[in-house]
Amino acid sequence: MLRTPRLLAVGAAASLVLSLAACGGSEDSTAPAEDPEELVLSLVPSGDVDSITESAKGLESFLSDKIGIPVRAEVTESYAAAIVAMKSDQAQVAMLGPIGVVQAEDQAGAVPVLQSVRYGSVSYHTQWFTNDPETYCADEVTVVDGLKYCNGTDAAKTGPAGEIALAKIKPGTPIAFVDQGSAAGYYYPATQWGAVTGGDALVDLDAQFAGDHDAAVLAVARGDYPVGVSFDDAREDVLADEPKVASDVVVFAYSAEIPNDGVVVAGGLSKELRTKVTDAFTTMAKDPKGLKTLKAVYDIEGLVKVDRAALKKAKSVEENFGE
C-alpha cells in the first residue's frame, strides 16, 4: 500500500498527543529508584464499556493478590489514550491489540511480554461484511450456525479469503471502520484494500470510525453503511440485541492473519516487578477462575510468550500509517 501524505497524516492523528521522540522498550531498561505502590492496568473496550468495566474487577483482584501490590484497572476511550497513559506513567500495564503493542513499545518504552490465545490460535483476521450481498458476493450466500457468509469465508479457517471481492468496493463507498488504533478494525483492512485496488482507503473511501467492533457490526446491520469491518466474528456479540445481524449482515472477505492482542508492561518498572506482572498473568491463564475472568474481559483462552516475529510483521503494517 502506498504511503500517501493523507494516509500518514490520518495515522498520525490517532496518536496526536504522543511525542515523536520514541523511547524503545527493552528488557534491560534502567529501573527506577522505587517501583510504584500501585499498578494501573489500561484496558480498551472492544465492545460494551460497562461490561468490560465490570469484568475488570476480577482482573484487579487476581493480579493484586499474585503481584503483591494493588492493581487498578482503568478503561480508556481508545488505543491512543492507553498509550498516552503509559507514556505519562499514568498506567504501568496495558492489554492492547497488536498495533497498540508495537506503538506502546516504540512510543512509550513499554515491553511486550505475553500474547493471547483464542480458539487455539495466536492469530486472527479482519472480517469484511455487508448488507448488500448482490454487490459483494460472487457466489450463493451460505448460513452456518445462523450467520451468513459468501466467497468461501464459511470454510476458510484463516485469511486471506474472498479478497478479490474487495475490488468491488468502489471509491466513495462509506465504510464502517472501528478505531484508528485498531489492527483488525482499521490498519489491516485499509492496507488490504489498498493492496488489492492500488488506492488509498482514507482518501478514496468514505471512511468512518464506529468506535468499537460491536458498533461497526450494528451500523451495517441497521443500514447506516453498506460495508464494515471487525474481528471475526464480532457478530456473535450483538446478535441477541439486534436480530438483523443474522438476517442482514453477510461476511464476504477476510484479511491476512493478525497476531493476537497482548500484554505490555512499562519499561521503567524494575525487572523484578515486570517478571511478577508477567508471572501473574501467566498464572491467571492457567487458573480456572482466572481464565474465566480473562475470557469475560477479552474472550482470552490462554496466554503465551509474545511472538516477536509476528509483531515485526504488525510493525511493518503500522509503518504504512505514520513515521
Image (spheres, rainbow, N blue to C red):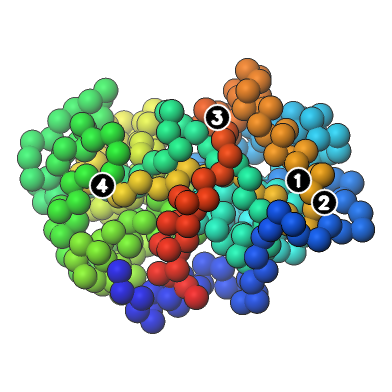
Amino acid of disc 4? Pro
What amino acid type is highlighted by mark number 3?
Answer: Gly
Is residue 148 depicted above or below 11 in this figure?
above
Q: Is residue 226 left or right of residue 286?
A: left
* Residue 233 in view, yes or no: yes
Q: CA distance from mark 2 to mark 1?
A: 6 Å
N-terminal of the pair, mark 1 or mark 4, is 4
Instruction: Kindly state the secondary structure of the residue where label 2 is placed.
Output: loop
Q: Which residue is mark 3?
A: 302
Few, some or many residues within 10 Å of mark 1 (<14, 14–19, 20+): many
Vertical placement of residue 59 versus 251, above or below: above
State how far apart marks 4 and 3 are (Cα). Answer: 24 Å
Measured as percent of width and height from the top left, residue 149 is found at: 20, 36
Q: Badge 2, how many Cα within 10 Å: few under 14, some, many 20+?
A: many
Horizontal side, residue 301 vs residue 283: left or right = left
The residue identified by callout 1 is 274
Residue type marked 2: Ser
Task: Please state the horizontal and vertical placement of residue 56, each as a whole percent of the image.
Answer: 67, 35
Query: Circle 4 is placed at which residue position?
Result: 160
Q: Is residue 83 above or below residue 306?
A: below
Between marks 1 and 4 in the image, the one whose residue lies nearer the viewer:
1
* Residue kind at label 1, given as amino acid type: Arg
Q: Quadrant of residue 208?
A: bottom left
Q: Which residue in the structure is indicated by mark 2?
A: 270
Q: How far is mark 1 from mark 3, CA to CA?
A: 19 Å
Contact? badges 4 and 3 (CB < 8 Å): no
Labelled pair 2, 1 in contact (Cβ < 8 Å): yes
- Residue that lies at the very extreme toward the top in this rendered image: 288
Task: Locate residue 105: give its quadrant.
Answer: bottom right
Give the SS element for disc 3.
Answer: strand
